[in-house]
Amino acid sequence: LSPDGQQLVLNQGSGGPAAMDVIALRVDAHARGDSARPLPGPDSQGTSLNKDVRTLVKTPAGETNGAISPPDGRWLAYQSNESGNWDVYVRPFRDLERGARSTVSTGGGTQPRWAPNGRELFYLSPDGKVMAVDIMADSGEFARGDSLTLFATGLRITGRERPSDTFYDVTSDGQQFFVSELIDDPGSSVDSQDSEAPVHVIVNGHIGLGKE
């Protein structure tokens, strides 16, 4: 959901995450009941056929897990396999066509999540670590710091996970994380179809970043 509560960022497509695009649906359209109808796909130029649906990112590759930065909605983070591997990217949300795309992840990444102040972006590395990146954009230009490992989840991210799967999230104060974790086989891939695998939810309240 955008910080102003007016747009809901969704995945659209079929055939798995490699065939997805990132779109935004106007929330007032949902309130009118329009969302009860299937969302139309884009036309041949990638333009949405529904005035309440805005195509945010569409390439021949797959894009999922779009997230708009708080508190001002300036940036859109998402994951894409355009390079051949899943990475996290950021581009200006208000000027998607003209704004340059920036790579945020190092060595691959999925499931971007913004800190509440918009000055940090979190993501999952391929070996299941929660990473943090400082975002410096006071001048209006996007700039990023180095990726910092916060903690390991024990998960192995393959990029074949369903876009609707969420394996971690950050609390509204930015101080705690909720992580879904396989207990018996921490090295298991999270795209496993074993419905009997136990799920453990942990809360990490002190991640030791050395910041006040």
Image (spheres, helix red, strand yellow):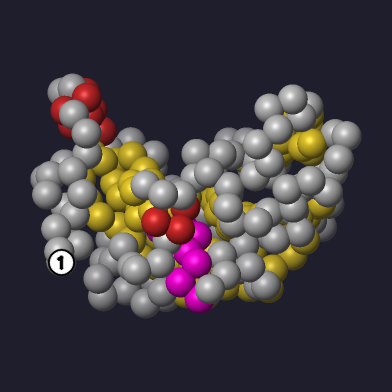
Q: Quadrant of residue 201?
A: top right
**Is residue 67 among what the camera can see?**
no
The residue carrying pointer 1 sits among few (fewer than 14), some (14 to 19) or many (20 or more) residues within 10 Å by Cα, namely few
Quickly name the residue at label 1.
Answer: 45
| Residue at 56%, 65% in the rendered image | 86
Amino acid of disc 1: Gln
Q: Quadrant of residue 206?
A: top right
Left or right of residue 160, residue 16 in this image: left
Please say if 75 is above or below 101. Answer: above
Predominant secondary structure in magenta?
A: strand
**Percent position of residue 52, x then y:** 16, 41
**Quarter of the picture holding the N terminus:** top left
Q: Quadrant of residue 205?
A: top right
Left or right of residue 81, residue 151 in this image: right
| Residue at 14%, 58% in the rendered image | 43
| Residue at 32%, 74% in the rendered image | 99
Asked if residue 36 is among those painted magenta in the image, a careful observer would answer no
Front residue (pair 41, 135): 41
**Percent position of residue 90, x then y:** 46, 66
Front residue (pair 56, 74): 56
Please say if 195 is above or below 43. Answer: above
Front residue (pair 90, 5): 90
Q: How many marks?
A: 1
**Percent position of residue 138, x then y:** 46, 69
Residue range corresponding to the magenta coloring: 76-83
**Is residue 204 among what the camera can see?**
yes
| Residue at 82%, 57% in the rendered image | 210
